[in-house]
Amino acid sequence: MKAIIPVAGAGTKLRPHTYTQPKALIPLAGKTVLSIIMDQLIEAGVNQFALVVGYLGDKISDFAKTHYPHVDITIVHQNERKGLGHAVYLCREWVSNDEVIIALGDTICEYNVSEMVNHAGSVLCVKKVDDPRDFGVAETDESGVVTKLVEKPHIPKTNSALVGIYKIAETNLLFSCLEQLMHGEEKKDGECGLTSALDCMVHSGTQFTTMKVSNWFDCGKMETLLESNATLLKKWGGTISAEHSFENTIIIPPVSIAPGCTIQNAIIGPNVTIGEKTIIDYSVVKNSIIGAFSKLYDVVLHDSLIGSDTVIKGETRTLNIGDNTEIDLG
């Protein structure tokens, strides 16, 4: 089974972090967003991946080669930002006539991945939401078959939101619909939408069934990313690498601490993820994500997202700081 993971977006809602780090590589509960998605699919039997990269694509490619050396991964470049549908269309030759999973690179869900992969036919994963106007929504008939797909409807007829995970059996039809959209007048702001192409498939006879996901973790902005980090740490229990040095330090689980960290005279946790080779001294950190190779001295941090290669000295703050930053709060 093949899977397409579009990771070409600029991640503007997570700036300044996404100026230097792709959103898919932001640390989350001891992993990255991308590794959580790929690990789920690999465990379910997916053995070929196409990663559609654009902004900071070299970092995605390097990460894939380093962390998944034995997995068949193809890097597809989306040099122009023409939408999610265009990103998928670029994989048409790689897909050939095979079935394919499409999983958006910022979508983490809990669901029966094996059931979706092995389902005979096309599947859309959905989750009921309070306000579906910000999502694509799936309208279904009494038997659960999808009758219409609408992107960000002003007056939604259902609250079943598309979460960004799809199994497509009729891939020839998908790419035909995408081609029609790209050469038609239905593009919004010059971009080709995937939801519109899937709706084209519905009206061309494809019978999509829906699969409900039990949890949908929002990784799109700082506040919800921290909430997702805390939820996943509690669920997975967190991990602390054996390669570390802790002196006069209190750890309050759940936390995830990567290899090579030096932490002393500190209180860490709960709900903290720390990247590799980070140094923390005389500090308190809770409910935060700290990037790799960072240095924290004499600070109290809570509800903060700190990028890699960052130096912070000072006092109590709530911070949203990108990579390669030095701040003295003294």
Image: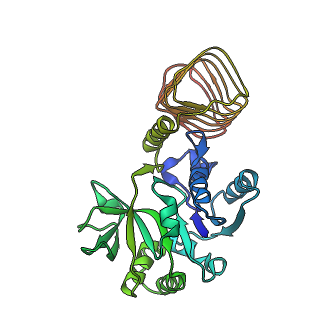
Identity of the residue drawn at 45% across and 86% down:
184
Residue 24 appears in view? yes
The one of 250 and 303 positioned closer to us in this rendering: 250
Q: In this picture, is 110 found above or below 186?
A: above
Q: Quadrant of the C terminus?
A: top right
Q: Position of residue 57 (x, y in %)?
A: 67, 59
Q: Nearer the viewer, residue 108 or 167?
A: 167
Residue in the image at 43% along x and 39% along y: 227
- In the image shown, does 146 or 277 lie closer to the viewer? 146
> With 223 as the anchor, is 98 left or right in this view?
right
Q: Is residue 196 above or below residue 270?
A: below
Q: Is residue 262 left or right of residue 174?
A: right
**Above-or-below relation of 19 to 290:** below
Relative to 305, residue 19 above or below = below
Q: Quadrant of residue 95?
A: bottom right
The quadrant of the image that shows the N terminus is bottom right
**Colour scheme used in the picture?**
rainbow
Count how many numbered circles sit on residues in the image: 0
Q: Position of residue 163 (x, y in %)?
A: 42, 60
Residue at 60% across, 83% down:
97
146 or 51, nearer to the observer: 146
**In the picture provided, is 311 more to the left or to the right than 11?**
right
Q: Residue at x 67, y 38 (%)?
A: 324
Where does the image place residue 40, in percent across and percent down from the top left? Answer: 56, 55
- Could one spot residue 189 in this view of the protein? no
x, y (%) of residue 61? 71, 58
